[in-house]
Image: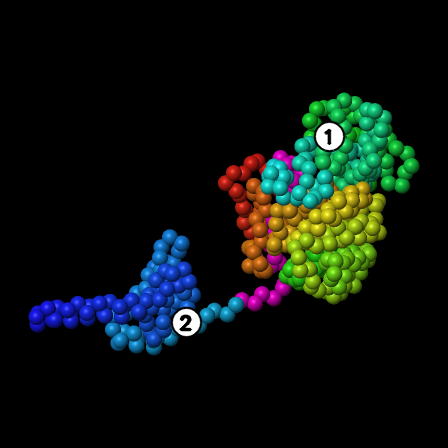
Amino acid sequence: MKNSNYHTLVLSSLILATACGSAGRKTDSGGAAVRSGYAGGEEVALGDSSLDRATISGTVSDKAPTTVRRTKSKKSRRKKSRRPRPKPEPVRQVTPSVGLLTAGSWSDIENFQVFAAFSQKLARQNIGAGQSEAMRSIPTRQLIVRLRGKDNQALENVEFRWKYQDGSISRQSYITKTDGSISLCSTWDRLPEAGTVHAMIRAHGEMKNHLVPVTIKESQADLTIKCNELTGKGVKQLDLCLVIDCTGSMGDELRYLQKEISNIAAKVKSRYNNIKVRFSLVVYRDKGDQYVSKRFDFQEDLDNFKDLLDDQQAAGGGDYPEAMDEALNDASILSWNQDQTARVCFLIADAPPHGTRESRVQFALSKLRSQGVVVYPIAGSGVQSQAELIMRHAAFVTGGKYLFLTDDSGVGNSHAEPHIPEYNVERLNYLMTRMIVSELAGEVIPARPGDIVRTVRSKRRSQVNR
């Protein structure tokens, strides 16, 4: 009987001890057990964000569970509690200055198949379903027209139209870039069919059209038209316009541009000291903000322009799309010079226009294009595929390149990778200067090897030109 009572007492003690041990366990919100204990006088719970880093051994990852190293004695715990904790490193504050921002560039004109593939990919994903027809249509054909005059000189700043086989004349008129070229695309333009058509060419200030017969081959992508009656005049002026999204998310980009503009102007002036330069500014936000769009027409005084730019602040916005259509329309009605002028517009943005307003973007780009204005979009942080497509389209149809900020500077939020096979990273002020100088020279000025920060290549890259 005593033995039976003794065994009963022992069994009861074991059950009680087991119950007490279970009472020392916690469960998380999902019912999973969470061990609790003490290390250095602080409670440690697996899966909790308050883990004492000194107690964790190994690397925390999705595949390996966190391991807690238990201390062996109170003495060792006291030693750990007395060990001074390292002070957190202060967050690096970057003061906006010249040459910090980094960016890459891409030419869809020179890589049409890449552009067409990107458009097709977005169409499959139903991105841009609310866009205008020209924006969402997949381009199937490209035609680059190059006008040459006497002695094979580039005919810059001349007006060009098609006279088709049926005798009709193209509604869209084009002004050639400083290299004498025009970039045409099947989604925007009525391209001539194979056969004989006429090019209607008229120099600035003249009333007479020169009709030049042209033979078009099927699927021809590059066409040189020679007009011996005209001579290239060269470039003597630069009209430079900044169109800037000034909503809250663009604060970093705006502050740095305010620092960069004088440096860019000085670099251009050092290479072309006989060039007359004018500056203009368009800033925009969105409906319901303090303003939608404001334009400041061209002026020659750089100091005044710099003060004007410095007065701008980033605020407002709230949703993703912004009033890009209003800003581009304002840019199209500026007093652009025509004769012997390089016309450059930098569109600095991180969001697309509202879907219902994209036809207005198309219309504004058509007006800029008919004045020979070359658009160079600069994509900031936060740019998504729809904004990238619209900005690349703007560059393609006006003869520009797509520029985009990169993370190499360590400034601002993370920047999305563009959908292109490869690119070089440069300092933004050097890159913008190079784009301007290329327009003044009438030819592509390549980056100097020493100006390239790094080269990015995708695993599946094609032969491309930068």
Q: Three-letter amino acid code at disc 2?
A: Pro
Q: Is residue 367 visible?
A: yes
| Residue, far right | 207
Dot placed on the residue nearer the N-terminal end, 2 or 1: 2
Q: Secondary structure at mark 2?
A: loop
Which residue position holds label 1? 223
Task: Report if the CB atoms under discs 2 and 1 are less than 8 Å apart.
Answer: no
What is the distance, in whole Å, between disc 2 and disc 1 at their CAs? 67 Å
Q: Is residue 152 visible?
A: no
Q: Residue at x 52, y 38 (%)?
A: 460
Q: Residue at x 30, y 65 (%)?
A: 69
Q: Three-letter amino acid code at disc 1?
A: Leu
The secondary structure that dominates the magenta segment is loop
Residue 246 position, x and y percent, is 70, 60
| Residue, far front | 1
Residue 8 position, x and y percent, is 15, 69
* Pointer 2 local density, CA inside 10 Å: few below 14, some 14–19, many at least 20: few
The N terminus lies in which quarter of the figure? bottom left
Which residue position holds label 2? 86
Left or right placement of residue 67 versus residue 192 in this view? left
Eye-nearest disc, 2 or 1 = 2
Range covered by the magenta-colored residues: 92-116
Residue 260 position, x and y percent, is 67, 59
Left or right placement of residue 409 versus residue 359 in this view? left
60 in magenta = no
Q: Is residue 308 above or below residue 179?
A: below
Q: Residue at x 70, y 57 (%)?
A: 245
Instruction: Identify the image's colour scheme: rainbow, by chain, secondary structure or one colour.
Output: rainbow
Q: Secondary structure at mark 1?
A: strand
